Amino acid sequence: MTQKPLELILARNLMSALSTPAFLVDEGGVLVFYNEAAGTLLGRRFEELGTVGPDEWGSMFGPFDASGAPIPYDDLPLVQAVRNGRPAHAEFAIRSTDGVSHSVEVSAFPILTVHGSQGAIAVFWPKQAHSNGAGPA
């Protein structure tokens, strides 16, 4: 197992103390942690899921646009923050493991070091719940 950069370890420690749902991805978009508040929103604790790549977390949780269609990976705030080295923000829907769709606002912040971007933190603000499981109504 490869050692994670110190900045990702410190970001994970910070996120563990937050009561706001938050995701942590590495520079390749691999989901390396989400906090307890995100686990409650998604219906699954990180310890149950573990580290997963963008295709897997994208198919499980979304995100989805207003019509319920998946949002392309390159358009996600997390990806933009990592690639551009600056914060990004968006509104979309995510789906919990029980099929409930949640409208959220997401702000993503890059984790920058002298070696470049090491990943990003995304903070989620839930807006309202939908019951159709496909996306916002």
Image (tube, rainbow, N blue to C red):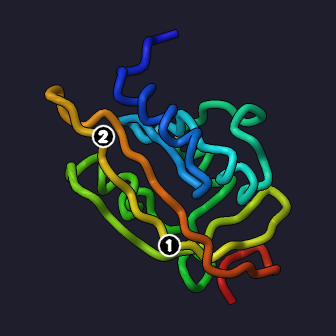
The mark that comes first in sequence, 1 or 2, is 1
Q: Is residue 60 left or right of residue 132?
A: left
Residue that appears at 57% across and 42% down = 17
Q: CA distance from mark 1 to mark 2?
A: 20 Å
Q: Residue furthest top?
A: 1
Pinpoint residue 60: horizontal percent, then vertical percent.
69, 53
> Local crowd at mark 2 within 10 Å, few (<14), some, or many (≥20)?
many
Tell me the residue that label 1 is attached to: 105
Q: Position of residue 44 (x, y in %)?
A: 78, 47
Residue 111 - label = 2
- Residue 96, quarter of the rendered image: bottom right
- Quick check: marks 1 and 2 in contact, CB under 8 Å? no
Q: Residue at x 57, y 73 (%)?
A: 104
> In x, y percent, where is residue 124?
53, 63
Residue drawn at x 36%, y 52% as measured from the top left: 79
Q: Residue furthest bottom?
A: 137
Q: Is residue 137 above or below residue 63?
A: below
